[in-house]
Image: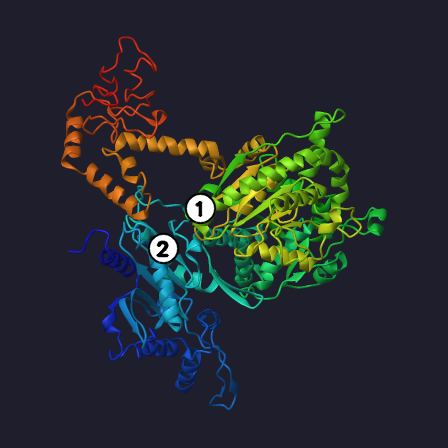
Amino acid sequence: MARFGSEAQWEDLALNALGELGWPLLRGEEIAPGSGERESWSDPVIQPRIAAALARLNPDVPQTYLQQAQAEILRPRSNDALAENYRLHEVMTKGYTGVTYLDSNGIERTPTIRLISTEPAENDWLVVNQVTLRDREHHRRFDVVLYCNGLPVAVVELKRSGDERADSSGAHAQLALYLREFPMAFRTVLLTVASDGATARYGTPFTGFDHFSPWNVDDEGAVIRAGDPHEDDTYASPLEILLFGLFNQERFIQLLRGYTAFSERDGVLAKRIAKPHQYFAVTKAVGSTVEAVRSDGRAGVVWHTQGSGKSMEMELYAAAVHRTPALANPTIVVITDRRELDGQLYHSFADSKLLPETPVQIATRAQLRAELDGRASGGIYFTTLQKFGLSKAERDAGASHPVLTDRRNVLVVVDEAHRSHYDDLDGYAAHLRHALPGASFIAFTGTPVSFAERDTRHVFGDYVDVYDLTRAVEDGATVSVFFEPRLIPLARLADVTEDVIDAAADEATEGLDTIEREKIERSVAVINELYGHPDRIRRLAADLLAHWEQRKAAMLPQIEVGGKAMVVCATREIAARLYEEIVTQRREAGDDTWHSDAIERGKVKVVYSGTTTDPDPISRHVRRGHEQQAIQKRIKTADDELEIVIVKDMLLTGFDAPSLHTLYVDRPLKGALLMQTLARVNRTYRGKDNGLLVGYAPLVENLEAALAEYSDTDRRAKPQGRQTDETVQLALDLLTELDATLPLDWHARLRGDASPSAYLNTVLAAANALLSPAARQGVEDAEGEEGSRRTPGIDAWPVRCRGRGRSPAARTCWSCGDRTSGSTRRCASTSPSSRPRSGARPGSPCRRTSRACCARSSSM
């Protein structure tokens, strides 16, 4: 009989689940070469089933040409697995048009030959276990392969539970090995699954494990946690939840056709597949959009946490609405309030190979009006809200914005639609409504709509879908971000009042773009004096560099590189002066590698917008667009020597650099901008399990105020913004509970040897101790004591001395788990030095358990 949690048991469970979902089962040897199914040991495709599907789905195409199409489709064009995967994905989703022939009437035909039907019942589904692949150099056996019409479309790799060397990450590593050894075996594979039963994650064959995702929701998108009660008993384990979510045949076809996105930038191809929160958000958003077009034009707000893939959701949404007949090939207008965001989002769309047409970035108001005026359908346009302004002549005449189109099939997609970004920009939102009176509006935001932003909901409607901070961290879509306050006092001037400071801070925290820089400059002088005093800059640089060296050393074992840091300053002048001070202090320490005039060299760079007419030292760091992009590329390159980038406004929103793990903020950010900035360090990366926000400016109250707008779960769990001291105390409390629970001295076992093997041996010893006859007898004795109020897992163990705590502060009463003081193991009920109670004395029975507590060196 297979051991519980073995690969064989998980395989049986997977096959049973897939059988319930309508995937008939065969064994690997039943489709092996010579069986009439597979033709080659090195290729898992089943040619006869492909031929049968082609004939079934294309009855009007002569057999000869179907055979020709089959040969051409399956003939590799390159040895690049990803390139072949993209080529065949296009054929599987759009059909093949490479065959031309004359029909019986002499008319030339170039049919679209289908490989896979959108109707599940028209396809031939199959699941096969233990599929052998071999060539001259390699011999492998895939655990589970899923087929659609003879094409392998998914591969499942399973490992046994409880083995640190063979968990889900080990299964992913095995899949990566298969891909290297048999790249063409994955040319039609949509997704792969890595599981040890207790955990299960999926992604494309080309996705790193840090971007693999669980499918942990039911058919309505509600979160399921394994072990929690659920009316459907099919959701018993993470593996079953994933299988029933992904391999429902109708959903699988949806994922294949509409929720898988290829993109290409600088000649590098990438493949992504939607995670469950993205799939359900887009599905709901399309449905709400159809209703909005039919009614009041308010399609709603999608709030998905920064870093969880909002840009991809917008890309999937744009593709989905174009496929929806009820929306009549809509014109999509994507709007941001900043040119930087407009460019970032536009480039992500321009890279996409999923969208039906190439997006257009609007450069001028005149171009916007020319593009939209008179267009009947289609088009994807990117613009800023400011483009919906009036000309000088229109303003002088008191005219309204001209109507560009009153069509109903116009969708306005707004990125980060908050009142501070949307309503207070000189009436641009009103102009937008005048320009597109028949349009429907939908918003995608990474931060919640504020309680004060009722106007935003009035424009867009209610939430369509919510994916909060806590879920994103639980799913591994983002990492937790901790907060460490390291406040450096401000220089105070006699003529600068609190009102002046508050007004200046409000001006500087709005995150406005270059168009409105004049508004910010009114406060620059005050901010420069407060935050940019030379003595304060020196203290800031010294503390930052010392902290960064410690942080970098701490992260190195996790992510295998030092990683990157971002410093956010209050003004451009302060950013430039901080750069000079960092370089000076490093040079004085004997390291002259931090400064370089070359864009591609140097360990610290400054990024902000400006012109050559800016005063010194600001002008030293004003660069052309391609130079800024080169620095941004260096930040995203984990092994580049660039360590620290100093910014003011640029890169605070919409910028992704996964190896960026530390954020130093010396600027009083607040609200949505604070949370968007904090999200720069919440991206996943190999081995990265946290990001850190270091506050040199006052941020505590601003963080609390910002989190107050989030979900109840986020406010309790604080997955972003929890102070490090609070986290340390939580860890100490958990260790205290562990001390009170385990009947063995695990500290002694790990003292001096913290290796993985020592850790594993300690865990096994703890499990054995908990399952020992003495422990079970203790439980039975405890259950038999009438009137007892013992806490399970703490006071059920035999009473004996447990005085070898880590420190006096961490000790607890062995009997009841109450915290103790001094060198004793007595609880508050019996220790006069702690909380003396009437009649209590050392050695008295604990009032919670009726057992005697012990002194450090005595046994009971």
- Check disc 2: other Cα within 10 Å, few if <14, some if 14-19, many if 20+: many
Viewer can see residue 330: no
- Tell me which residue sits at (29%, 31%) in the image: 739
Left or right relative to 858: residue 489: right
Its colouring scheme is rainbow
Query: Where is residue 487 drawn, in percent x and y?
Result: 59, 32
Which residue in the protein does label 2 denote? Answer: 169
- Tell me which residue sits at (31%, 51%) in the image: 164
Between residues 707 and 466, which one lies in front from this camera angle? 707
Cα–Cα gap, marks 1 and 2:
15 Å
- The image quarter containing residue 695 is top right
Query: Where is residue 749 drawn, in percent x and y?
Result: 27, 39
Residue 233 against residue 268 in the figure, above or below: above
Left or right relative to 594: residue 463: left
Quadrant where the C terminus is found in the figure: top left
Query: Where is residue 849 drawn, in percent x and y?
Result: 23, 21
Q: Residue furthest top?
A: 838
Residue 737 against residue 578 in the figure, above or below: above
Quadrant where the N terminus is found in the figure: bottom left
Give the amino acid at mark 1.
Asp
- The image quarter containing residue 185 is bottom left
Sequence-wise, the earlier of marks 1 and 2 is 2
Give the amino acid at mark 2.
Ser
Mark carried by residue 689 = 1
Viewer can see residue 38: yes
User: At numbered mark 1, what does the secondary structure look like: helix, strand or loop?
Assistant: loop
Between residues 826 and 162, which one lies in front from this camera angle? 826
Residue 80 against residue 646 in the figure, above or below: below
Query: Where is residue 618 drawn, in percent x and y?
Result: 74, 47
State yes or no: discs 1 and 2 in contact (Cβ < 8 Å): no
- The image quarter containing residue 578 is top right
- Tell me which residue sits at (58%, 37%) in the image: 543
